[in-house]
Image (cartoon, grey):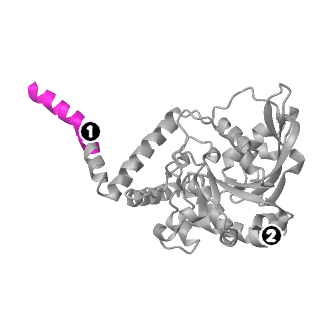
Amino acid sequence: MASSISVVIFAGLLPLVAILALWVGSLYDKRLANVLYKLHLLRLGMGHMLFSTDKKFPKNTPDSGEVVEETVKQIIFVRHAESAWNLVFNKGFGADFPGRLGSALTKEGQLFPTLDSVFVDSPLSKLGTGQADGLQEFVETGETEFNELLFGQPSAGKSIIVSSNLRRALSTCTIGFWNRLRRTQEKIHVLSSLQEVTFNVDGMSLATPYTSPQLADDELAALDYHSPEDFDADRYYDCSENHGNKQVRSSGYKRLVEFCEWCFDTPQEEYDTIIAAGHSLYFRFFFQYFLPKSSTHISKKLKMENCAVVAFKLVKGKNSNGKTYFRVEEDTIKNLYLGFEEKKKKKKKVA
């Protein structure tokens, strides 16, 4: 009996001893420190998958159609390119799915002692880096009315580039606006308020508060860098407003409002346009809640394409209750590059 109790106690203490040993080892070995941090993120990610309130938006939100205009800001949304997570889970679950998943799991195991990951804060796929190159070509050679502004020409007005704190958005933005960043010496401002609205682990940021996530090898290669040590993140990213990962009981709607408020804060008054790199669900929710409730615009139902660029004007004003709220001016929405995904047609059942 005593020996059985000893076995139970030992079995219960073993995980604690292992964690303690890992913590002590992490003080001396960076790889073990990375493993410990990854375990923390996985624990947080599981919490999000099981208990997240991120998609639980309030039912009775103000009608943006009632907003009386006080001031206006030009906004340009840029959706990220295809991520490794998209490659595994968004291509269907047919015969090739086990192979895609197996390859991703194998690579995840190889990356576990590093600050890189396939699933957590998923980076761009190889196709994604190619899409980001296409975005760069559009920024530099496109012929829309906004291209001089996107390229950073002073005559087109003053603009600021901001991004979600997730890698797929930040790397897409970096690659797409690479030549502008090097020419103007400006930085991308990383905003935690742009973090994707999701409970999946790919929506967890690898970056700690007030830092940027480490770009993956393929993302760095697209910028002609061979290792994370060669890339000076502090030169290209301002992370003073990256307050870290969203909490399990977070609100995606609250982040939408926070971003709107940020756009009109005093430090942003000098900018005519805000270029924001982010995510499909975040952008779709944004249009759903800040277009008038009577609007039937496709942006309320359809996601933006990977690397799509969409411009619109955002109004700040007072609603019928005298409270500050925001409105997307529907007639100013313009697809500059790629636009919105086509609605998938349902396959007819064969009798």
Q: In which quarter of the image is residue 330?
A: top right
**Viewer can see residue 210:** yes
Q: Is residue 102 magenta?
A: no
Give the magenta-colored segment's residue range. 1-19
Residue 152: give x, y in percent of width and height: 76, 66
Specify the label residue 56 is tagged with. none
Q: Which residue is drawn at 80% across and 64% down?
A: 149
Specify the label residue 16 is tagged with. 1
Contact (Cβ within 8 Å) of mark 2 with mark 1: no
Seen from the viewer's position, the closer of residues 333 and 230 is 230
Q: Which amino acid does label 1 sit on?
A: Leu
Q: Which residue is drawn at 38% across and 54% down?
A: 34
Residue matched to label 2: 142
Seen from the viewer's position, the closer of residues 224 and 108 is 224
Which secondary structure class fits the magenta region best?
A: helix
Give the alpha-carbon distance from disc 2 to disc 1, as whole Å: 57 Å
Residue 202: give x, y in percent of width and height: 54, 49
